[in-house]
Amino acid sequence: MIRIETVLAVILVFLSTLIMFSVKWLLATWSELTVDEIIYHIVAPLQGTSTVMVKEYLMHCTVPAALVSLIVIAVFITYRKKKAYGYALMLSFVSAFFTTGFTVINAWDDLDLGNYLVSQFEKSSFIDDNYVDPKDVKIEFPEKKKNLIYIYLESTEITFADEKSGGAFKDNVIPELTRLAEENEDFSGEESRLNGGYAMPGATWTMGALFAQTSGLPLKISIDKNAMDSQSSFFPGIITLGDILHKEGYNQEFLLGSVGYFGGRKLYFNSHGNYEIKDYSYWKKQHKFDPSYWVNWGFEDRKLYEYAKEELTRLSQKSEPFNLTLLTVDTHFPDGYVCEICQKNFDDQYANVYNCASRQVKEFVDWCKVQDWFENTTIVISGDHPTMDHDFCNSVPNEYERTVYTAYINSSVSPKINVRRDYTTFDDFPTTLAAMGVTIEGDRLGLGTNLFSCEKTLSEKFGREFEKNELEKKSDLMIEFGQIDKSAAFESKEAKELKEKEKKTKAESETKNEST
């Protein structure tokens, strides 16, 4: 008969070793991983995660933990009737305890757990004092509303340009993107070096970045306040870019080659702006590719741009203005996805993928420029966050400030001051509207500042380090924004179960009728 203490010992050994291997894998795979990001993804839907990432995790974490557990089980079986069994049992409990302790100590510095825990007991009024609610601001659109194309480039930084252009690499990996920023607006003033937005805490992973650039807020979530897989809305108390454009009658679409549910992206864009979500699942249903087709996170960017051209041609024929938002994925770490049109211009695979992504963006923008609707369309190209790849930026000096790629194309306005701006991705929120010819009372929305105006950004006003430190602390306003109606969450699950029950009953009824 299996003894309860044996089962408990095996479970503890498995969990402690799984945690140890998981932390080791996370720190070896992710660069600049934050606790906020880990917590967010614990409570957010993970449907649609890259199969490569899943296999990597299973191979480097789950399998080793299972093997260690099997060895422990073998020891227990061998000594089950001997005196050594008690020692083996005690050793298992002690080992599990020390393994967990060692893992925590190992992760303490790398994840900056000490400062994170301290920040959770500190409150800051920085967000509360500096947040400008769009509901309280006069926002005026021009008589002829301008279309918007917003392209989020996965993990794309200015860093990848050459040093002469403001990057940190010897050779320019993104030459086409560099020229686009130089020929258009990146708020570098009279300097020849590229300029981009700094990703603040709460904006250093994809969903956090999308949230920051469209709401002017960091995605700060408390694990006991939010469970994104069971909610019917995403921060319902805030007004975002999508909400503002929806109110003005824009047709809005969010195109991506991965699964929209991942990280709560579909929920967010549905909740704020009523976007049509056209993700991997949508395009599969349109028979754009074989149902079994799946590479990387879904399908490659080459297809995404093809579908975007089709959508733009269709949307441009409608009487209403449009907002087409794209999220690329080929450049997702580790090492990116090598598609059919990638060239081998560099020794590093990731560099070749970025190089290919740069060419694809240029080709897409060139196509847009010859369309009839381009004259009345603003294009915003922005990296979502700095790359998380652990070794691609090893040669980058510690003092180099890594910022995301930024370019505003065909803006309705020009900067009022021709100086290099110090800005964050929060500033993209009001700046995008301003580029579309929208007048914003006070030139500020959320924590963002209209970069075309003379108004100082919060980074320029308070200093980037001060702003960063304050954002890491708790905010009463963000807690209020993040409050979830518990009953709504329960009703959401209940409604889902009822829907499934009704569907099953209907199917059974139809089968019965057919047999009759």
Image (cartoon, grey):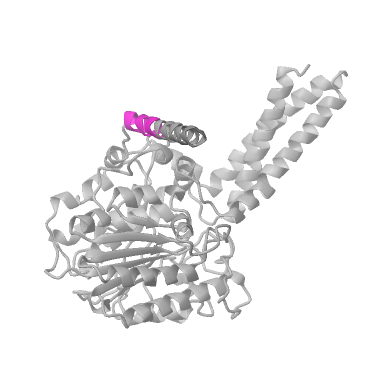
Q: Does the magenta-highlighted stretch encompass residue 488?
A: yes
Image coordinates of residue 167 in percent, x first then y, are: 46, 74
Q: Horizontal placement of 377 versus 18: left or right?
A: left
Q: Is residue 16 above or below residue 448?
A: above
The number of numbered discs placed on residues in the rendered structure image is 0
Q: Looking at the figure, which quarter contains the N terminus?
A: top right
Viewer can see residue 476: yes
Question: Between residues 245 and 42, which one lies in front from this camera angle?
Answer: 245
Image coordinates of residue 136 in percent, x first then y, are: 14, 50
Q: Is residue 502 above or below residue 46?
A: above
Question: Between residues 321 and 183, which one lies in front from this camera angle?
Answer: 321
Viewer can see residue 204: no
Q: Does the magenta-highlighted stretch encompass residue 349?
A: no
Q: Horizontal placement of 277 versus 21: left or right?
A: left
Q: Which quadrant of the view contains residue 147?
A: bottom left
Going by the picture, which residue comes out furthest to the front?
Answer: 516
Question: Between residues 421 and 287, which one lies in front from this camera angle?
Answer: 287
Q: Is residue 394 above or below residue 493?
A: below
Give the main secondary structure of the magenta stretch: helix
Q: Horizontal placement of 461 versus 386: left or right?
A: left
Q: Horizontal placement of 104 versus 240: left or right?
A: right
Q: Is residue 29 above or below residue 226?
A: below
Q: Residue at x 46, y 57 (%)?
A: 285
Image coordinates of residue 346 in percent, x first then y, are: 60, 78
Question: Between residues 371 and 24, which one lies in front from this camera angle?
Answer: 371
Image coordinates of residue 511 in percent, x first then y, are: 50, 35
Residues in magenta, as a range: 486-496
Q: Residue at x 43, y 53 (%)?
A: 260
